[in-house]
Image (spheres, grey):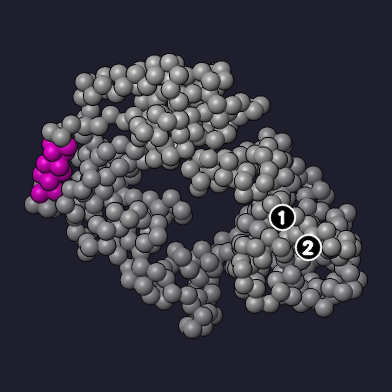
Amino acid sequence: MRRFFVAILFIVSCLQFASAQSSNTIDEIIAIVGKEIITKSDLEAEYATYAAQYNSMDNEDEARELILEHMMRQKLYIHQADLDSIEFTEQEVDARVNYQLNYWLSQVGGNSRVLEEAYHKTMDEIKKDMRDVVKNQMISERIQQDITANVTITPSEVKKFFDRIPYDSLPMIQPTYEFGHIVKIPPVSDEEVEAIKTRLNEFRERVLRGEKFSMLARLYSDDPGSASEGGELGFVERGTLYPEFEAVAFNLKSGEVSQIVKTKAGYHIIQMIERRGDKINVAHILLQPKPSTDEQVKAIEYLDSVRQVILSEKIEFSAAAKKFSDDMNKNSGGWCVNPYDNSYRFEKEAIETSTFATVSKLIPGEYSQPIAYVNEDGKMTYRIIYLRNKVAAHKPNLREDYDLIKNAALEDKKQKLVNDWLIEKVKVTNIKINEKYRDCSFVKEWGITQ
């Protein structure tokens, strides 16, 4: 429970700025760590955010204790960073804040208004409130990285770690799949490209004559993430969008509509909606050239013949992918990579629905028939999928899940080292805790006496 809580608490901390401190909370000092102070309102603010994220609380006192332990750990890391003169530039902090904001925006279709409405703040205010939370997290990560930089683990240590876990306590591992694909991208004719450009120029002329850009985007744009929003992308900074897109978008004036812009996703026209400092909010209409029916049929026939060649000549999958595939991953064996953990193993939830419908029906070593596939750039392609391995739901074991267990054992070893470091630092650091909280289990573990 305690390790799980620590693992997720950063999410709570990142959202802390969205919580209002209770006006009824009497602000008193709970703890002092070096020069750092924790007040009751600090604790209640983090608790309120955690409670909002997890509706049911089995034990409120235990939750507050775990939150307080986490906060005191953070303060001790900050204190140590001050002693070690560890600093981060504004640019480094802003880069992490922007990364987090861009991730959140990607979860809501790039529409910043969703975040602004959720937190009742502008994007500038959200970003400002995030800076201290993110900076403290960066400090915490740096200190722990310094402590554990040279930690390694041996196979015998992995086995001892695993053997110590009671069988009944082992979590059930969901079914996983390892697969690759061979992709064929049907070519698009010059006539199709010209037709796309002609349509976009017609849309641009209609806007200049007074029609609403947003209405045309809703009706005709091929961008599923923004079409329903009238093509609006929300406020973004440089480095978020395609370079060719940004080069034009950031130079538009309010209300101005661009000429046609080509990116990997297709062809766009862009309208400037609003500029706020270094950020812009633009709308766009995307049209993606489609291959002709003949070219699609040829792609299917090509992949069907490739499949027959592989099976008849018994060509190893990675060699076949390198020889026949149009996808960039052919240079790394053709294997599909799970974007959530950069492994080759996928649980069902990490696989797109139509892909899972195909993968789940294959047996290891089997190739699918050619199927339609929309790639990362939104282009219509076709592919055959090869299933390398399928692991049924099971309790973890060293044979099938060694890497997973090894990572857990390594993290456990690192955590113990950090805890040992913490106990030693507590002895030489000015730490005081309010007597109301001295019965917390971690206070006794740390050896805090005042």
Q: Residue 244 sits in which quadrant?
A: top left
What amino acid does circle 2 point to? Leu
Look at the numbered disc 2 and give the secondary structure of its residue: helix
| Mark 2 or mark 1, whichever is nearer to me | 1
Query: Which mark identifies residue 104?
Result: none
Query: Which mark identifies residue 19?
Result: 1
| Residue at image coords 62%, 62% | 53
Q: Earlier in the sequence, mark 2 or mark 1?
A: 1
Query: Which mark identifies residue 43?
Result: 2
Q: Residue 323: horizontal and vertical position, in percent?
A: 21, 40
Residue 229 painted magenta:
no
| Residue at image coords 21%, 32% | 291
Compared with 161, 124 (above or below) is above
Q: Residues within 10 Å of mark 1 (few under 14, many from 20)?
A: some
Gap between marks 2 and 1 measured at Cα: 12 Å
What amino acid does circle 1 point to? Ser
> Which one is nearer the viewer's eye here, 167 or 264?
264
> Which stretch appears magenta?
296-308
